[in-house]
Image (spheres, helix red, strand yellow):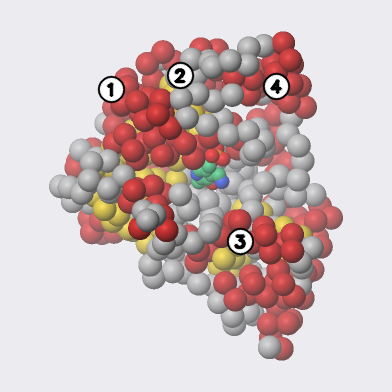
Amino acid sequence: MANAIYSGLPTTIFTVMSGLAAEHGAINLGQGFPETEGPEAIRRRAAEAVLTGSNQYPPMQGLPQLREAVAAHFRRWQGLDLDWRGEVTVTSGGTEALACAFLALIEPGDEVVLFQPLYDSYLPMVRRAGGVPRLVRLEPPHWRFDRAALEAAFSPRTRLAVLNNPLNPTGSVLAEEDLALLAEFCVGTGAVAVCDEVWEQVIFDGAAHRPLMGFPGTRERTVKIGSAGKMFALTGWKVGFLVAAPPLTAVLAKAHQFLTFTTPPNLQAAVAYGLASSDDWFAAMPRDLAASRDRLANALRAEGFAPLISAATYFLDVDLAASGVAEDDMSFCLRAVKEAGVAAIPVSAFYEENPVTSIIRLCFSKRDETLDEGARRLARARDLSRRA
Ligand code: PMP
């Protein structure tokens, strides 16, 4: 029979909502992917590499030129001093990088501190690795934790703390003092921080991403995870990075070698090229996305909705209760996709227990017409819900 952890898992909410969107011909503001195809020069590089480069197994840790480019990128943008030889591993997306971290670092019975709302792969993978989740609950509108919350979650048995910053599904960025507090707890308890920073480059209004790895005492005990899919709006590419001090990298690479061993060499070559040549892209991409965020927020406000603040990611959250919707997030999202032709994601799906049930997540990395029509259809869904 199937493993109990897996046989009991629901299908992820992204697949459910995208399936309903297709079935009902709805506008999909649910799953987080751009409507554009990503930078053409990088895609051309990938195509050339397929035709003229090697299509055989690349090195297990990743192409040297990509590992060098990753180290140089994080040095330049985040002030991190990384040795590409011993501290960078290329994975098949951030998803594999997360799996590597959990499989390589958790011993059965270890406690793992995680923050709700949670990205959907965390808990199943932590549990499969034998970890015992200790959950910290974050709430709108600020999605912050405090010292008391960390004191309740951390213990001498804490092995890992898993942080997603910027945070999907909220679009929030942790304040410097909150990062410093978490760093203090990791250092104090000897926990390793697994930092899912896949949204690090998708951050708005001139803000700079602060990696937890840059805080005092964390350099040797942090696993930093990145994703080229998010950096370059190529979400299907699944090229990710694991960055960690050499003793951690050595064991992470052991997990990687038996999960996927390598990642397509052509995509790696194209990402290496992209990292080295994309200053313009890294300036324009957040600016364009912030314009889309503002367009959706304004269209929603004009319809009487109450959007929350989005400082990063592809997502804008809306407070249903403050928008005149009495239904919970899941009921409203099902109604919206089936009856009004617009898909959104209920944020309660990101909670394991005691969910926040009045917030929906909308993806704004879409064309203006899609966003405008999406806002109109959400207003229609609200009308229908009021009449029901
Ligand atoms: N972590 C978070 C928080 C994400 O939002 C995503 C993608 N939606 C991932 C990890 C997975 O990244 P990738 O697509 O590179 O596997």
Q: Earlier in the sequence, mark 1 or mark 4?
A: 4
- Amino acid residing under circle 1: Pro
> Residue at position x 74%, y 59% from top?
22
Q: Which mark is residue 247?
A: 1
Q: Earlier in the sequence, mark 2 or mark 1?
A: 2
Helix, strand or loop for disc 4: helix
In the rendered image, is residue 227 in sight? no
Measure the alpha-carbon separation of dots 1 and 3. Answer: 40 Å
Measure the alpha-carbon separation of dots 2 and 1. Answer: 17 Å
Residue 32 image offset from top left, x and y in percent: 64, 50
**Does the beta carbon of the residue at mark 4 sit less than 8 Å from ligand 1?**
no
Residue 74 image offset from top left, x and y in percent: 49, 24
Q: Residue furthest left?
A: 156
Q: Earlier in the sequence, mark 2 or mark 3?
A: 3
| Quadrant containing the C terminus in the rendered view | bottom right
Helix, strand or loop for disc 3: helix
**Mark 4, residue position:** 46
Q: Which mark is residue 16?
A: 3
- Amino acid residing under circle 3: Val
Say above or below: 318 vs 74.
below
> Residue at position x 34%, y 26% from top?
254
**Mark 2, residue position:** 60
How many residues crowd around disc 4 within 10 Å: few (fewer than 14), some, or many (20 or more)? Answer: many
Helix, strand or loop for disc 2: loop
